[in-house]
Image (spheres, helix red, strand yellow):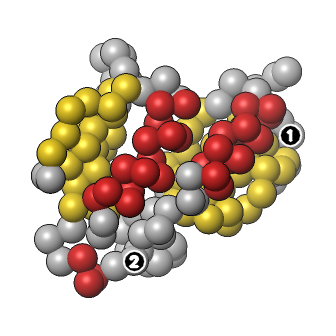
Amino acid sequence: MPLFDHLGITVSDLDRAIAQWDPVLTALGLEREEGDANGAAWYREGETELILMPAREPESGPHRHGTVGWQHLAFAIDTRAEVDRLHDLAVSAGWTEVREPKPYPRFTARYYAAFLEDADGIRIEFMFNGVE
């Protein structure tokens, strides 16, 4: 059982967020559950559920990286090539590239990652830190 049961993210436009998040999360092996105007969720047995919910005050966004609150969500990926593929898939789904896929030797000698933001400024990372 995962330590974190679910992660909820508030978005300004639920339909737009689903269009951005769904290709990424399904490529990571999560399945989208039935949703409604109150939210959408993705889940896979043994993993943390991710839920998108519409903002009660949409005019308050977008989130700015570095302010109090959300920092980023890192997805552990099996290979550098898969980091590259997921990066390209996310960009095609409307995510904005923050940092292209590249090595980050300041973290570890093996660390390779890409950083992206959705339309609300929510940042994700695809990262590989293994041996190929």
Position of residue 101 in the picture relative to residue 11 (left or right): right
Residue 4 visible to the viewer: no
Residue of label 2: 62
* Front-lying residue, 51 or 93: 93
Query: Which residue is at a point 67% across and 63% down the rendered structure image?
Result: 97
Expressed as whole percent of the image width and height from the top left, the position of residue 94 reads 56, 59
Q: Quadrant of the N terminus?
A: top left
Between the residue at mark 2 and the residue at mark 1, the CA separation in whole angstroms equals: 34 Å
Expressed as whole percent of the image width and height from the top left, the position of residue 90 reads 60, 49
Location of residue 68 (image quadrant): bottom left
Position of residue 120 in the picture relative to residue 99 (left or right): left
Task: Give the residue type that dot 2 points to.
Answer: Pro
Q: What kind of element bears circle 2?
A: loop
Expressed as whole percent of the image width and height from the top left, the position of residue 79 reads 76, 27
Q: Nearer the viewer, mark 2 or mark 1?
A: 2
How many numbered discs? 2
> How dense is the environment of label 2, judged by Cα within 10 Å: few (below 14), some, or many (20 and up)?
some
| Disc assigned to residue 93 | none
Is 15 situated above or below 121? above
Position of residue 59 in the picture relative to residue 76 (left or right): left
* Front-lying residue, 44 or 38: 38
Task: Give the residue type that dot 1 points to.
Answer: Ala
Q: What kind of element bears circle 1?
A: loop
Query: Which residue is at a point 39% across and 77% down the rendered structure image?
Result: 62
Residue of label 1: 109
Query: Which residue is at a point 37% across and 50% down the rendered structure image?
Result: 18
Residue 59 visible to the viewer: yes
> How dense is the environment of label 1, judged by Cα within 10 Å: few (below 14), some, or many (20 and up)?
few
Expressed as whole percent of the image width and height from the top left, the position of residue 92 reads 64, 52
